[in-house]
Amino acid sequence: MLAETLGNPRILFTVVVAFALYAYHRNSAKEMGIIGAVWALTALLSPLEGSVRLFSRLRRIWQPDVILDADGEVLAYQTPGVILVRQTPKSKIGLGSLVAVQDPLGNTRLALALDHVGRDEGILLRTIELNDVQTPLKVQEQTSSLPANSVAAITSDGSDLPEARLVQSRNSLVGLVAPDSSIETVLFEVVNTGSGLEEGRLVEVQVSKRTVTYQVVNGFTKEEIVHQKNTFGYARAQAQKIGEWDDEAKRFRLVKWLPEPNAPVFLRTVGAFDPLPDAIGHLPGTNYGVTLRKQDAKEVGLECMVTHNTAILGILGIGKTSVALEIVERMIASGIKIVCLDLTNQYATELAPYYDSAAEAECIKKLQTLGQSGKKAVKKNVEEGGSRQVFEAAIAEDLMNFVNPKNDWRLKIYNPAQFEVWKQDSKPYQDTASMASLTPAEITHIISDATLRAVAGLGMTDRARVCLVYEEAHSLVPEWNSSVAEGDRAASNGTARAILQGRKYGLGCLLITQRTANVTKTILNQCNTIFAMRTFDETGKEFLGNYLGKEYANVLSTLEERQAVFFGRGSSCENPILIRLNDRADFVRVFRRACPPRRTAAGGMRTLG
């Protein structure tokens, strides 16, 4: 304060005049009187400045919007684009309002008020400069008399700045790109906590003049020094890149770069989602439908979901079967045949329009009779004892008929737990021998092998022919350390071999399970499309982290019902995305209206064995 006072021009001028009067004019009263009068007129009254001030006051009275008063001063320019302002006690600047900044070179910049970041002698306000926007002449006139580094609120609502998206979309502005962002991940400081920002929501950022969409996957709090020892706490969000939306293709395109520091981040909100026949779900908070990959250079989503296998993973009651039923129904409609191994008995009910339950019930009854008949079928050759060989032959015949391209059957359902199939596991003694029933995993192996042989007989192809659906896969193809019976290990290995060999014949699988850790990794590692739903076990999250990245793997435990992280060859998006899946009733209503089920006849009874 002392330095500012002593450095005042009037003080310096007074000191110089006083010294001159004493040194050169002290002997002349007339000279001292004239010089003193000039000093008083210049230093005390300042007629020129007084006239300007009077004129300015009159203009404020007659035209109150012509000249603006300062509402604050620039405290710091934080490159790039952010200006930190110390507000005056009577400041009229509100959050989200436009301000004019008089820079040291006398140029007027426009900025948007973002948020308060701390307290010093006044409130510290963070603003972001409007780049590439011409300051209107009216604003330049209003701020022409402001001193350098002054900040004033302006009355414009932004309607005269149509090129400034930052102004037009200020209500959806949620943050600024923070340091340590990367090509795949953007970190941003949240400036609008009441915007509805939450996990799974979409945000948009400019990347090389392209509007790129990211998905929020995490958030945490931070604290840093704003000015001197003044600190403030704030929220920082983490979002993963999805891509640039292609409205014509209805999919996201990959963008291989990152946004500039302090670039504005906008929340993407596009109304309520209206279910679409080709959408597997939608991105939360938007009407962006998420589709399976459509025809491109080489692949179609449904086909590569078969040939490159698909897994649906998540805890009990989270909606896995609903997703599986939807995918199966889409496959049936596209001409892919389904062999479903269902321990829950849900598929026959839910897919009734595609399933001839009466004919299939008779087929299943004959298979059950053949299996039960082997309980007392003792043979000298142990391998021939029991009913396994007879059952295998009957299954092979049934599946050979099913995959035959000449018929239009589309859905075959087996419940491995309903078959009582026996194998002889000891040499006979007095026409008796030890018998053991096959486990669901062993029957799964028989069905999988028979399906592979049936499609192999049709020759090699790069198109999908048959999809094996393993519902409750942890019981049908268990990992070696989760096997209950000794034969389950060999059975799981055999099923896995069938899947590994099936691709070149158009055979693949859809695997549904509650426990990732309990399913054979030989098959799971071959699943190139993943629907990861809520899970809590660390083994499952660690495994999925290799597919989805640790950012998405970390959100799995907080996913809501009917939400999933979707990624792989079957997705229309190049990166993992968190989606809200279709409700079963909505899907059935919309899809079956667009693709009415065509019930196929089973073709009468077939002789088995």
Image: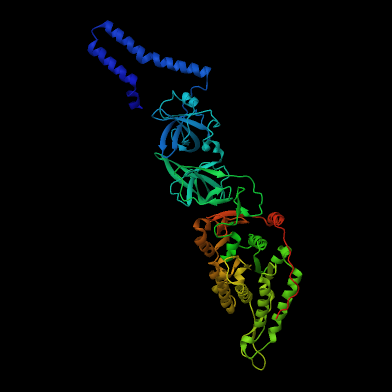
Camera-side residue of 601 and 524: 601
Camera-side residue of 433 and 404: 404
As drawn, is 535 to the left or to the right of 418? left
Q: Position of residue 40 (x, y in %)?
A: 35, 12
In the image, residue 443 sits, relative to residue 375, either above or below, namely above
Name the residue located 72 percent from the left edge and 58 percent from the top edge.
596
In the image, residue 290 sits, relative to residue 122, either above or below, namely below
- What residue occupies the far top of the structure in this picture? 30
Name the residue located 67 percent from the left edge and 77 percent from the top edge.
397
In the image, residue 519 sits, relative to residue 68, either above or below, namely below
In the image, residue 256 sits, relative to residue 362, either above or below, namely above
Asked if one can make out residue 346 in the rendered structure from this viewpoint, the answer is no
**Quarter containing the C terminus:** bottom right
The way the protein has been coloured in the rendering is rainbow
Total label count? 0
Q: Position of residue 496 (x, y in %)?
A: 56, 72
Camera-side residue of 193 and 272: 272
**Quarter containing the N terminus:** top left
Q: Position of residue 34 (x, y in %)?
A: 30, 8
Asked if one can make out residue 116 in the rendered structure from this viewpoint, the answer is yes
Name the residue located 55 percent from the left edge and 38 percent from the top edge.
169
Q: Position of residue 246 (x, y in %)?
A: 56, 48
